[in-house]
Image: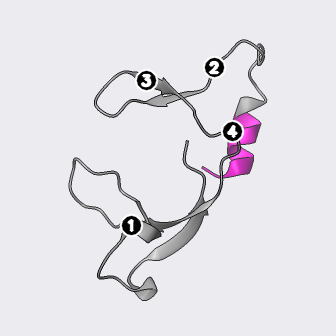
Amino acid sequence: MTVQQLIDKLNTIQDKDSIVVMTRGYEGGYDDINNTIPEPVAMALNVNEDWYLGKHEKVDDMYDATNSDYIVVKAIVL
């Protein structure tokens, strides 16, 4: 999903002032979004194959890989 696609979806919400944005908790439950201004980060796409990991990884957290090993995009993490 791109930022514009997210904006378009959010614009369809009728009661914007009372709906809270949350993210999944580490092992369960949900947490409030702590980012007041989300910053784009470099994200490598489709690098994790293990079922218990998300598909993508922050480039800064990757070891033993070069940029030619994967596709990198800018991403906002909520």
Q: Amino acid at mark 4?
A: Thr
Residue 51, position in %: x, y?
Answer: 21, 50
Which residue does the image show at 37% across and 21% down from the upper left? 29
Task: Determine which of the numbered discs, if any, sits on residue 36 in the image.
Answer: 4
Q: CA distance from mark 1 to mark 2?
A: 30 Å
Q: Decide which of tag 1 and tag 4 comes sooner along the chain.
A: 4
Magenta stretch mostly in which secondary structure?
helix
Task: Determine which of the numbered discs, if any, sits on residue 20 in the image.
Answer: 2
Q: Decide which of tag 4 and tag 2 comes sooner along the chain.
A: 2
Residue 49, position in %: x, y?
Answer: 24, 61
Which residue does the image show at 74% across and 21% down from the upper left? 13
Q: Secondary structure at mark 2?
A: loop
Residue 19, position in %: x, y?
Answer: 67, 16
Q: Decide which of tag 1 and tag 2 comes sooner along the chain.
A: 2
Which residue does the image show at 31% across and 25% down from the upper left? 28
Circle 3 residue: 30
Tell me if label 4 and label 3 are in contact, CB under 8 Å: no
Q: Amino acid at mark 3?
A: Tyr
Residue situated in front as seen by the camera: 31 or 52: 31
Q: Decide which of tag 1 and tag 3 comes sooner along the chain.
A: 3
